[in-house]
Amino acid sequence: MSTILISGASSGLGAEMARQFAARGHDLALCARRTDRLEELRAEIAAAHADRRVEIRALDVNDHDAVFEVFRSFREDFGSLDRVVVNAGLGKGAPLGTGRFDANRETAMTNFVAALAQTEAAMEIFRAQEAGHLVMVSSMSAMRGMPKTLTTYAATKVAVAHLAEGLRSELYGTPLAKKIKITVLYPGYIASEMNEKVAQSTPLMTSTEKGVRSMVSAIEKEVADACVPALPWAPLSLVMKHAPLPVLKRLM
Ligand SMILES: NC(=O)c1ccc[n+]([C@@H]2O[C@H](COP(=O)([O-])OP(=O)(O)OC[C@H]3O[C@@H](n4cnc5c(N)ncnc54)[C@H](OP(=O)(O)O)[C@@H]3O)[C@@H](O)[C@H]2O)c1
């Protein structure tokens, strides 16, 4: 049993990870802006697993001071945090140069700068504990530069993956490498509020329950990187990384 902090736990992948981690016997520190959703989720988990401890806090991850305060206060509540899942994210975006810097900036701030704040706050705790597991929720879109509405989003997702890899590289060969684990997840299409509109247009969409089962399994194994679900996304990641641009354009 361990204590897991999940940001963006009020819907989609974050909420489903909370359900599945609770079923596996973990205690939970959940945060997001919509606390009504967190309250409902806590009640649902308490009804299914009465012995699980679930603490919730309001958090806008773009309020960076609050990120540090909330993470520290969760640690004080539980005594330690074993795992932090940097999951909160936004799918807004518009083609570059079309007058929607506001939307692209909001995505960049939420998906990258706020993820950096969460990583700093988590690593501060893990370094003090000399233990912990950082999980970064990236995206299959990180495999390659993406066009149009996905351009900024994909750039943020490769950036967070590189934050995690940089940390892994820093820890490699040191005594902390065995104590602080780093996992990067690259989800494909998994049903959630973020991709409700995409849901009708792609046969590659996986249900929330099944997609998150794959995420949770990879997290529990503390793998370094995982495309989730593995099929079709692990083989597709090779195509996405290596296909020449004309081939890639036909796929997207
Ligand atoms: N679903 C997919 O197919 C897919 C694929 C690849 C990657 N991902 C990644 O998976 C993560 C979860 O997304 P999802 O698909 O579950 O979408 P979702 O259902 O829209 O959930 C997004 C979550 O992020 C939280 N969030 C957004 N902005 C926030 C802010 N400023 N402060 C705090 N929390 C914030 C939301 O909570 P509040 O609004 O309550 O604050 C919500 O709980 C994201 O990082 C996304 O990029 C998803």
Image (cartoon, grey):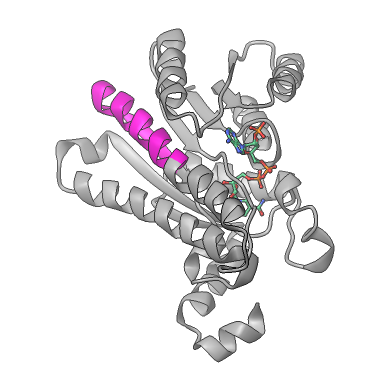
Left or right position of 181 against 206: left
Q: Is residue 141 magenta?
A: no
In this picture, residue 81 sits left or right of residue 57: left
Asked whether residue 115 is drawn in magenta, I would say: yes
Left-right relation of 80 to 139? left
Assign the C terminus to one quadrant of the image.
Answer: bottom right
- Residue 182 in which image quadrant: top left
Q: Which residue is at a point 69% across and 26% down the rendered structure image?
A: 34
- The reply, left or right, for residue 229 in relation to residue 43 is left
Q: Position of residue 236 (x, y in %)?
A: 57, 73
Q: Residue at x 52, y 86 (%)?
A: 245
Q: Which residue of the protein is positioned furthest toward the left in this rendering?
A: 174
Report x, y in % for residue 205.
74, 60
Number of on-image labels: 0
In the rendered image, the vertical position of residue 17 relative to residue 138, given as above or below: above
Residue at point 68%, 36% (across, down): 16
Q: Position of residue 179 (x, y in %)?
A: 27, 33
- Percent from the top left, x then y, of residue 177? 23, 41
Q: Nearer the viewer, residue 187 or 24?
A: 187
Near-viewer residue (191 or 219): 191
Outermost residue, right direction? 200
Q: Residue at x 68, y 30 (%)?
A: 10
Say which quarter of the image contains residue 122. top left
The correct choice, above or below, for 15 with respect to 188 in the image is above
Q: Residue furthest front?
A: 99
Q: Is residue 25 visible to the viewer in this orientation of the structure?
A: no
Q: Which residues are magenta?
A: 114-135
Main secondary structure found in the magenta portion = helix
Residue 81 seen anywhere in this rendered image of the structure: yes
Report ligand 1 position as a quadrant: top right
